[in-house]
Image (cartoon, rainbow, N blue to C red):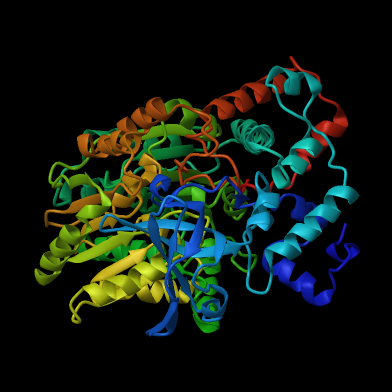
Amino acid sequence: MDLNNLKGIGEKTEKLFYKAGIEKVNDLLRYYPRYYDVFEEPVLIRDLECDRTQAIKGTVVREVSVKRVRNLQVVTGYLRDERGDAIKATWFNSPYLKGKLTIGSTFIFRGFVKENYSNFSIEQPKIFGIAEYNKKKGEMQPVYPLVSGLTNNMVQKAVKQALKLVETEEFLPEKIRNKYGLEGLQQAIEHIHYPTDKNQLYSARKRLIFDEFFMFIYNIRNLKDKNTEIHNRHILEEPKEVKTLINDLPYELTNAQKRTWEEIKRDISSTKVMNRLIQGDVGSGKTIIAFFALITAALNNGQGAMMAPTEVLARQHYDNLIELIKEHNINVNPVVLVGSMTAKEKREAYKVIESGDADIIIGTHALIQEKVNYNNLTMVVTDEQHRFGVRQREAISEKGEHPHIMVMSATPIPRTLAIIMYGDLDISVIDELPANRLPIANCVVGTDYRPNAYDFMTKQIAKGRQVYVICPTVEYSEAVEGENVIEYAEKLKRIMPVSVNIEFLHGRMKPAEKNEIMDRFANNQIQILVSTTVVEVGVNVPNATVMMVENAERFGLAQLHQLRGRVGRGKYQSYCIFINGSGKKEALERLNILCKSNDGFLIANEDLKLRGPGDFFGVRQSGDFEFRLGDIMNDANILKQASEAVELILNEEVEISDKQCKIIIEYENDSINI
């Protein structure tokens, strides 16, 4: 059903929904809330908790001031509760509040609580009359991800209509639903948008997360069944040039790298097409193994293609490969293909790819575009596989006649979960780091350590080094706790010496803008890069020696481990500072695992044990598979149940109707790229 069938959605509004990726009414039902505005009982000022959105009943005790700070109008007021405790409240660009907040007036103020040098303040609080707030108490209002021009109210209204108009077809057999305690699909979709309480939300999320995992695993298993039937049309032998290259490298491969290369050689010279995952910790040397595979394909009269998740990484791989083949006189002809190239550059790349003059092609999603025709594609390498998913992997495979597939991942997923998630692939693990790597020095500290951290950064920058600062959010939001990239970068500009160039980076920026900032950072034109986790994907800046992660408790340990892999890549000692914004003992215990070990696989297993599966409201553990709701670490228990359910159906232990089977096969799962 088209969106314009809903009341209030004309051509202009429809375009706004399109911008958010919502083209049909079914898309709208799968457009889940980002969080829920829960109107809780107001608390006393002494009972406030840092880094949380809370409500207080406060009386204005001083005249409200309005001051201009740079481009902002900062409104400041002081509130006192019934016990006599006071707190500062701050608003931005809201000068009209001066007239509303008169001395002696009492309201409910609901906003984000921050701590500065042991003093609490409340930022951007919404203001409610007491009777007005009492009516809202207990409500869980959905708050949706938005694009410019699209309001939360518009989405709420559209969703309410869609829920009345559309009956979602059930595809899970009743036996499966009963076995795993899952509610019906229609009920789950209604409750994810409008839960009456946390228990109802829990049940809805459980069902929808189960569906995401189930669909993914079902598709993976079908792919594996297809792959086992395929005969290897591209028998590849290790060329003498690769043997010489391995012997001539300025370092010796680790035993794990040698073992992995032997497994790859065995695959590509057998009667079966290779479908192999290379799982290796950050800095374990996966890329050089990928280069061996690409060169092997090229020197066996074929073509090798390597698909990276970002342009920056694709260009970096290309530059490194060019340097390697020049240094060792290897006669192959690599070409790069990325979205930001000019039309002329792309045409030239298409031409040499189709003719076979280019025998190694490195790029991004541009490699699977319709215009790209390969001459003889025999080897495909995907870097950081989770950024693509099964469909993209299939798309590039279809560009050749069943080429060998090699998938690289630095995400340290426990083996039990990896076997489920990568069900169509054989797994090689590079579980050693090169001997010459200096271990990263780690520390977990509270927010009061920040001044010391800033001093340390300044000293490192004075030595010519560079710094990453990671924040959990892009911009300020009253309901999403933690530091944000945009404000933090501004704050650092006020604190740091004028000579220090500070920029921010986040996923909402245009690719060209991101590329330009990363290039400037790589060239040391930027000394401090304040970023979201967008930097976790393998960019190599050997001169970066410090990483500080704000609100580290909000990230999964596996993700933090990947993030810290951005430092420690050069000859200098590197440091990682994890700021525990919550101050909670449990968070400290979790984060200290990072100080005790640099082994990503051990960290992932310890994290899983410590947190336990199924924490719906916890931090996102794995930034790897891009499910909309599910997280393979937090929701490991549901993942295992979904895997069991797929086996029951495929083994015909549970009956499934033709109609249900058709829905599963044709299901357009927007929650993940499958």
Toward the viewer: 358 or 340?
340
Q: Residue 451: horizontal and vertical position, in percent?
A: 19, 61
Say which quadrant the N terminus sits in.
bottom right
Instruction: Describe residue 563's horizontal placement relative to residue 54 as left or right.
Output: left
Q: Residue 177: horizontal and vertical position, in percent?
A: 74, 23
Give the image quarter of residue 602. Answer: top left
Q: Residue at point 63% right, 38% down?
A: 216
Q: Residue at point 80% right, 33% down?
A: 171
Give the image quarter of residue 327. Answer: bottom left
Q: What is the count of numbered marks? A: 0
594 relative to 506, above or below = above
Toward the viewer: 541 or 284?
541
Instruction: Describe residue 560's horizontal placement relative to residue 267 as left or right.
Output: left
Instruction: Describe residue 525's horizontal placement relative to residue 61 as left or right.
Output: left
Q: Residue at point 37% right, 85% down?
A: 70
Q: Look at the image and tell me whether residue 359 can be seen.
A: no
Toward the viewer: 417 or 133?
133
Q: Residue 499: horizontal and vertical position, in percent?
A: 18, 81
Q: Residue 125: horizontal and vertical position, in percent?
A: 51, 63
Say which quadrant the C terminus sits in.
top right
467 relative to 341, above or below = above
Toward the viewer: 264 or 529?
529
297 relative to 423, above or below = below
Q: Look at the image and tell me whether residue 616 can be seen.
A: yes
